[in-house]
Image (tube, grey):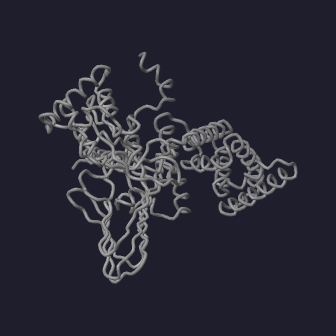
Amino acid sequence: MKTRSQFYVLVGILLFIGISLTLYKKLALDFTLTPGGTETVWQIQARIQFDAEGGPAKISLTLPQVDKSRKVVFSENLAQDYKYKIIEEDKGRKAVWSREDVQGIQTIYLRADFYQPGSAEASMPKPQGNPEEKLDGPLKLAAEKILLKARESAATDLDIVIKVLGQMNAESTSSNVLTLLEGLKYRSERMKQVGNVLALNGMHSKVVRGLRLQGKYTQRSISTFIQVYAGDKWLLLDPDALTEIPFKEVVLWPDDTGGLLDVYGGKESRIDLSVTSTRKSGGQLAVEAGRKSSSALIDFSIYSLPIQEQNTFKLLLLIPLGALVVVILRNLVGIRTSGTFMPILIALTFMQTTLLLGLLLFLVVVGVGLIMRSYLSHLNLLLVPRIAAVLVFVIIIFGAIGIASHKLGWEGGLAITFFPMIILSWTIERMSILWEEEGPREVFVQGSGSLLTASLAYLLMINSHVEHLAFNFPELLLVLLAIIIMIGSYSGFRLVELNRFEPMTRE
């Protein structure tokens, strides 16, 4: 393969892998592209209690339905000496505990933390065809009269549903309602009858059980709701309040799963549910959800490191951005700098000292260092001893600035310790040699270019959005590498050279 072909293949592979991994983390793992976003995390705790009869016991708890809109970030089972497992069934999932020879009052806790990054109703399939009509005879006649009354003052399908619910309550004295609700004791049965009435109006509906997500540390009970497809979307309604409920405020259980709690080998069983909420950053939740799902992109990444090492990598991942600034300014713009990577290290120092203070301290140290270095040039020292002497001078300058600033009550001067001493020593040596060979103008040009490059790199590296992307999407380094390689293949004019060669275009 020719060199040019290898170049295009390499750049294409780097761009494809970097962009693909970024999109996967955004779309599949719900990583946020912007910093500062927070999500509400709901914690539901189930407390199961029963009186064991002295033999083997088995407890089965139907779990809430899980879809793409909800992410479980933590779950905990607290049941000592019980075997625990999750069973996947066609109708949903169940948590099952079992134990041999258990006696007396038993208590089991199950806790789960989750958040909802997406829209639950968006993942619900659109119903097909017309709903099945299950009413006939007098029941159908009574339902049609209820619908007729509801349509009189309703402007939308939702209004019709609310009007029907308002008529068909347990305390109604209407003969039509009494006919439809005769013999129906439970709320779920009455809601199914409401669905049969709505079916005559061409509306799909289903009865669901759910837990309201409200308040903090509050005891909650599972309620019966009705879902109706109206206005080209699924709606969730509270039959008591006659209002629509956002899906994100309710945890729903699968349809037709029978009892919520089944206990074998025990009596007087009960379940208490409590709900609480907190706020967490979207990035942290995405990492926790990825760990919960055993995502390889999370398990084998920076997020698996201890917190202290993660903070170190937050800084290291910004260095390639500084390198990109250097490459652009040197190869495309044509700005000359003193060294290739010195501006990057100076930019890292500015992140600790702030820009203006860093520039001031840099100019003071380099200025004094050049004066001392000019004296050493008269002593005709060898290279290594001369560099070592400059290093000693730099440390003396550091100490003098630090002590003087502290005595004067200006604590900002103590930030001088953040500057890399070895790099400053070598910079002073290079500038001194440049002064002797090229003159003070070239020293000024390269020094100014270095500070300009370091300042632009600093402004890019302290940007909160850039820092967020660099740490949460380190695979973007592959895209950055592809860009640097493409710039490295450019051999045309630099921007500062356009004015120099402009007369050639006139000729």
Instruction: Single out the residue that lies furthest toward the top.
Output: 506
User: Looking at the figure, which quarter contains the C terminus?
Assistant: top left
Instruction: Please determine whether, in this image, residue 30 is positioned above or below residue 54.
Output: above
Residue 366 appears in the figure: yes
Pick the residue in front: 440 or 180: 180
Residue 290, position in %: x, y? 38, 57
Residue placed at 40% from the left, 40% from the top? 487
Residue 476, position in %: x, y? 40, 47
**Is residue 416 shown left or right of residue 18?**
right
**Is residue 384 shown left or right of residue 472?**
right
Quarter residue 421 falls in:
bottom right
Quarter residue 78 falls in:
bottom left
Pick the residue in front: 450 or 10: 10
Pick the residue in front: 330 or 30: 30
Residue 506, position in %: x, y? 43, 15
Residue placed at 50% from the left, 25% from the top? 500
